[in-house]
Image (cartoon, rainbow, N blue to C red):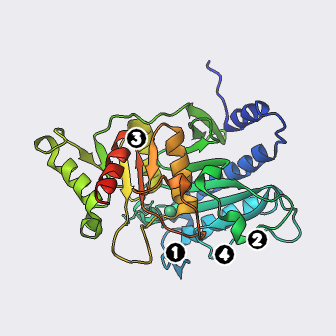
Amino acid sequence: MTTQVTLTQFIIEQQRSMPGASGDFTSLLNDIVTACKRISHMVNRGALIGVLGSAETENVQGETQKKLDIITNDIMVEALEWTGHLAGMASEEIDDPIDIPAQYPKGKYLALFDPLDGSSNIDVNLTVGTIFSILRAREGIAASVEDFLQKGTDQVCAGFVLYGPSTMMILTTGHGVNGFTLDQDVGEFILTHPDMRIPEKTNEFAINMSNRRFWEEPVRRYVDELMEGEDGPRGENFNMRWVASMVAEVYRILTRGGIFMYPFDTRDPSKPGKLRLMYEANPMGFIVEQAGGAASTGRERILDVKPEDIHQRVPVILGSKNEVEHVVSYHQDSE
Ligand code: AHM
Ligand code: MG
């Protein structure tokens, strides 16, 4: 029988290799894992426990919330607020940073999350996920908004959980990317995808084509060339996918390569892109880079963007390095 490595064991072993590590981080990650197992259970039970459908409320982004957006946010907050590892939290679903209640100690990390990414897919039973990013905080002090506004390069850890045919957690602490599958019978995440690497060569792209008329010229040029296939300048055919769950697209790219784009578009000048920097683009950008890929806004490396707002949006172009560089070069050509 082969020995199975659990996520907890994997993290503890990583921590042992870091002199001076206190165990706080391992413990924080375990709390996130517990929350995600709860979310997995809720998502899986779905209509049986009446959690599908709209909550008929709006979040800070002006998006109508699903019941599960609110439930999963509460699960994350309840699992993390009391632990003493965090000085604050930020969530896609809550306008302001979430304070740690006064009765609990303030820790040395900040957690930022999208509790249920791709939630438009929940009622049609497609893959959704939880995305999280961990930053350092000023230990022992309640975090201010400014404390959260750190670049993606400052992330201590980033991960996402996929609630699909299997529940999986994909994780980086800056030493490569590892994938774990939840063994529902024993309730443990098991290392199943060690050292994930994004294949450099790809013939697959993901973009919401219905927005084409709103894109800028460089993205239009790039996608049009892919669509021309072997008759066009690329001289080969490309295939397209769009799940409308970033977690599912990024997982596909980690396993078989590809490029994902939610680029700048002209629909609403106040929203330079749809995806949010701090709890979507940054953690995904960190993971993709750690797996040998690239992540850019088209004009700048995502991890180098200096955040001005917790809910700031950015254009996102990520995946196989050569293709991302191709799109970036078209942005440079147009400037
Ligand atoms: P959400 O966090 O509200 O679910 O929105 C983010 C999702 C991404 O997962 C996905 O890539 C994108 O929105 C899909 O958007 P669209 O419906 O415009 O194609
Ligand atoms: Mg999201």
| Residue at (56, 37) in percent of width and height | 177
Tag in front: 2 or 1: 2
**Distance between the Cα atoms at labels 2 and 1?**
22 Å
Q: Which mark is residue 99?
A: 2
Q: Which mark is residue 321?
A: 3
> Is 69 on the left-hand or right-hand side of 211?
right
* Amino acid of disc 1: Gln
Q: Which mark is residue 65?
A: 1
**Distance between the Cα atoms at labels 1 and 3?**
34 Å
2 and 3 marks in contact (CB < 8 Å): no
Q: Of residues 152 and 63, which is closer to you in this image?
A: 152
x%, y% of residue 192? 55, 32
SS label for mark 2: loop
Q: Which mark is residue 96?
A: 4
* Amino acid of disc 4: Asp
| Residue at (69, 52) in percent of width and height | 32
Quadrant location, the C terminus: bottom left
Badge 1: residue crowd in 10 Å (few <14, some 14–19, many ≥20): some
* Badge 3 residue CB within 8 Å of ligand 1: no
**Distance between the Cα atoms at labels 2 and 3?**
38 Å
Q: Which callout, 2 or 3, points at the residue further toward the start of the chain? A: 2
x%, y% of residue 127? 45, 54
2 and 1 marks in contact (CB < 8 Å): no
Quadrant location of ligand 1?
Answer: bottom left
